[in-house]
Each structure stands twice: as C-alpha cells, then as structure tokens.
Amino acid sequence: MKTKKRGEYTKLINGVEDNTLLCSASGHGKGLFGERIIYDFFCKGETIIGLPSHKLNMELGYAAFLPEKDYHKKGIKFQQEKPKSMNVKFYHFTTPNFPSNRELAPHKILSMDIKKFKNRLLCYYLFEEFGETGFIRLFIDEIHKLKNNEGIFDLVKKINESIKKTESFGVEAKAGDRRHLNRIVQVLERFRYNPLIFQHDCEFNLDMKQIIKDQKHYHIFSSRYISDVKNRDLITLYLLLEIIEAKQKNPNLPPVCVFMDEIKALCPSSVLYEFKKPLNKIIGEILSTCRGLEINIVATSQNYTGIADEVRGAFNNVCIGKITDLKDLGELSQVIKIDRNVRQEILGLNYNEFFVLNLEDGIDEGSFLTYFAPHCHCERNYNFDRMYKQKYPQKIRKHKKILSDIAVVWKKSQT
C-alpha cells in the first residue's frame, strides 16, 4: 500500500467552489474528517452553516466544547495545534413541540417568510409535483399579491376570492376552480397547527444575509423538536435556497461552507416517502448551483450508492473511508470507475484514513491520514444538553417568552 500523506488533502478539497462527500462505515471517522474540513474553511474566512442533522443529536454543536478524549487530544498535539472551543450560535424553527420551560443552550427561534414561497422549487416540494399546474400557478400568483402584513390565512382567503372572479387582459376570467383551492388547502393544512410560515414583516423570519455576514461563529441549525419528516426536509430546503438567494443578491458576502450530516437520510436512492422523489431532484439542482456562488458543500454518508443519483452527481470530490459493506464498494466501483488496486487500498484503510477521488478531473488523489478539528467531537454516550449545562451554566436559558411572542403573532394572523 502507498504511504499515506498527512493532512495534505486540504490542497485538494478546500477549493473556493467544491462539493465534497465523505463516505465511510459508522464509527470510522467521517464526522471527524468533516469537522476538520469545515474548520479549515473557517480559518480561511468562510462562514460555517450546519444544516439540521437527521440524527437529531446536535453533533456539530459539540464544537462549542474542548475535546476530552485522550485520542483526540493526542492527535491535536501531534498536529502541533492546541485544543480550542468554537463560538457557536444555535437556531431552531418555531414549533409547538419546542420545550418552553426546559433550560437549554440559547436558540434563536425562527419562522419562514411566506413571500419566499414564490420560489417554484419550494412549491414543487410542497405540492410534490413538477410543472406549470393550475394550482401551483394560482398559489404563486396570489402570494405575489400579499401585503407585507398578510400571512397564510390571508393567502387562502385571497385564493378563494380569485376562483370566484378575477380580471386578466381586460376581461373577466376565473383564475382557477374549487379543485385548485381544495388542493392548496390540503397542502397548507399541515401548517395550521404546526406554524412555520409567517407574514413577510414578521420579526422572527430568518435573515440569512445577517448570518452569512457573521464569520466569527459556527451557525448550527437544528430540527430535533420537529416531528414531521416533511417539515424537517422543508426546513433544510428552505435554508439552502436562502443561502443561494443571499449570495446571488449580495455577491460581496463572504464565502459559505455548508455542512450536511448523513445526506443519505435526506436524499435516499430508495425512497420511503413520495415527497422524497421531487426533493432528490431539487437538492441535486441546488447543490450544482452552489458551486458557482462560492458555496462549499461538505456532506457525510455511511455509503455512496444509498444516496440518490441526482444528489451524488453534484459532488466533485468523494472521500472514501473504511467500508464494511463489500456490495457497496462493488457498486461504487462501477459508478466511479475505480480499479482493483484502488479497491484493495480502500479495503486496507484504517480509522480516520480516507482515499480521495477528484471526480471532476478523473484523478485518484490517494490515501490520507486525516487531521482532527481542535474542538470537541460528539462521542458515544455524550448528551449535548447536559454537557452544555455543565460547561456554560451562565448561558443556558428557557425559551418560554419568545415562544409565547411567536404564538401571539400566529394568533393575530388568523383574524
């Protein structure tokens, strides 16, 4: 086997517009490697944004702590670095399930701006359908007509009025019929008792531009108190589109590094839910768009072939760690076209060793012993809430007031 290079992967996968996928079996260092990559991006001045993890365990949030395990501290010493904790901000979208009286790390509670749903990709996901259908066109047209203080209830009322009578090209014409209204109401019903979407002037709406401007913190989003899987995926999609919009409208914003843990759970090749089918196509399109906007995507997965084709094709760097599923390695070899010698090298990898492939240039970059991030990593039996309370007792707080304020805004929007 070739001699493994130490840390030199940063020259290969820390470009300005790279999408990097890390694949290895559970417990073989892909999380550690991902954390090191985004730490290197952070040191280069990029804004770090962690999207909600499907493991719901605040894994990247442990960056707020110093490492405790001996192997980690020895590794950092070998790297001639010092242990450090990162400045972290936590975000969660509003939900009735968010604990109001429990002492937690401080979270900024957010809502979605209803006017952002003019974006067709969000509509295609919500309605689980592509194309210029009558109800999607009606939905978008009426959002355009909303005033800044009008929300989802006002939208339904406007749609109801539009299907009765409207004017177009100087003549009276119906914008749709009762079937269109019923279809839209069925889709929006999920937000009636689980409010996420608020009027444009709501003070709790996400402001991605301000987040990207803040390069001093890790910005970590969580969905661990949102039980509905489709709503959790909607949040991830909404965040990605907001990052893209902010960068398109403000090209002078700093570069962004987005961390997506266990992307296979978000975009599986074998779908359990029907809404995953349009989501896979949409996420694949979005990740390809990111590469032209100084947005780096770093994603992890336990295997390669379990990720939807549309999504894995958006990555130009693939880093393969220890693989215990030989079938996955065989299928991966057919997709990426790696030869027998490379397969043998991958099978011989040890903990925290990865074989780097640059798919765009068709280059096998070789095996690397990867470095650790200087901050803490989520280990087995760790509990984030308990650890945060121990390390930062002066920072923990209850979120009862802000949740109550959001509930008041939602109640007013129904009148």
Image (cartoon, helix red, strand yellow):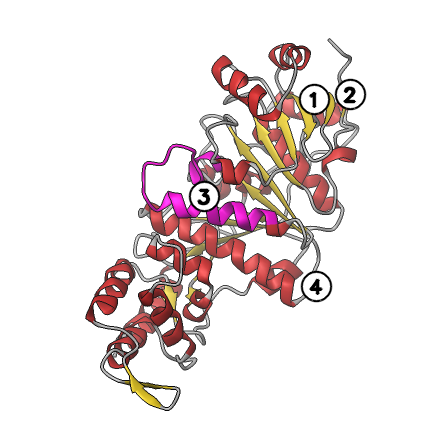
Cα separation between marks 4 and 3:
27 Å
How crowded is the residue under tag 4: few (<14 C-alpha within 10 Å), some, or many (20+)?
Answer: few
| Label whose residue precedes the other's in the sequence (1 or 2) | 2
Q: Name the residue under label 3.
A: 280
Q: Position of residue 80 (x, y in %)?
A: 79, 28
Segment colored magenta? 263-288
Residue 287 point in image, percent of width and height? 57, 47
> Could you tell me which secondary element the residue under label 3 belongs to?
helix
User: Which label lies toward us, 1 or 2?
Assistant: 2
Mark 2 or 3 closer to N-term?
A: 2
Amino acid bearing label 1: Lys
95 in relation to 409, above or below: above
Asked if disc 2 and disc 3 are in contact, CB closer than 8 Å, the reply is no
When the figure is inspected, residue 31 is found, relative to residue 197, above or below; the finding is above
Report which residue position mark 4 lands on: 251
Kindly identify the residue that appears in the image at 74 percent across and 47 percent down: 16
Q: In which quarter of the image is the N terminus?
A: top right
The residue wearing badge 2 is 5
Cβ atoms at labels 4 and 3 below 8 Å apart: no
Q: Quadrant of the C terminus?
A: bottom left
Towards the viewer: 304 or 32 = 304
Whether residue 191 is in magenta: the answer is no
**At which x and y percent is residue 389?**
47, 43
